[in-house]
Amino acid sequence: DYGMRYRTWDSQLPFFAGFNCAYFMKDYKKAAEYMEKAAVISHNSLYTTLAARFFYEAGTTDLGIVFIESMIKNAKDDNERKLYQTRRDALLAIQQLTSAVERYKQLFGVTPGSLVELVTRGILRRLPADPYGGTFYLDEKGIVRSTSKLAFIKSDVKKQDEKP
C-alpha cells in the first residue's frame, strides 16, 4: 500500500498485492480491489479477468459485472473486447443462477439439490450456457460454480504422433 501511494503508474504492485490476497489469504474482496487497480493502470486483459473473477469469488458478482462492462467500453481492440464480453456473459449467467437459487430458497425453504431443480420447479425456463464451455453446478455450500472454472476448456487434441 505504501508503494502504491507513490508509484501510481506501476501496475505490478497492485497485481502482486492482489495475487497475495487471493492465493495466500483467500481474501477475494481485497484481491479484487487490488487487481482492479492493476487492470485500470495497465489495461492488461489478464488483470481485468482476474479482477472480475475475484469479485465473483468475494460474492460480489454484480461489482465484477460493472467493472468488466467499463473495461469493455475502454477495450483497445476486438480480441480484448471479446475476452471481456465472455467474462461478462459468464458472470451474468452466474448472477442469474444465484438469483434463481435465492428465489428457490425463499419459496421452498431449502437450497435446491441441483441447478436442474430450478427448471423443473419453474424458477427458470432453462439453464444458461457457460460461455467457456463448462457446465454450471452448485457446490457443497450452495454456490454456483462451473466445471470450466471460468477459463476456456481446451479440446482434446490428438498428439501428432498418435495414430487415428
Image (tube, rainbow, N blue to C red):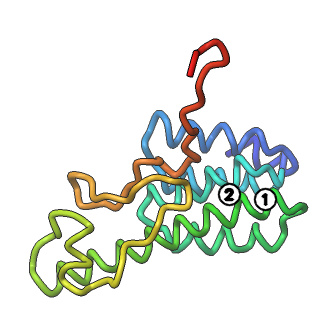
Asked if residue 23 lies left or right of residue 79, the reply is: left
Q: Amino acid at mark 2?
A: Glu
User: Where 118 sits versus 61, above or below?
Assistant: below
**Disc 1 crowd, CA 10 A, few/some/many (<14, 14-19, 20+):** some
Secondary element at tag 2: helix
Q: Residue furthest left?
A: 109
Marks 2 and 1, how far apart in space? 6 Å
Q: Nearer the viewer, residue 162 or 103?
A: 162
Asked if residue 108 lies left or right of residue 9, the reply is: left
Residue 144: numbered disc: none
Contact, mark 2 vs mark 1 (Cβ under 8 Å): yes
Asked if residue 14 lies left or right of residue 154, the reply is: right
Q: Residue furthest top?
A: 161
User: Where 140 sits versus 64, above or below?
Assistant: above
- Image location of residue 103, percent across then percent down: 25, 84
Which residue is the site of mark 1?
40
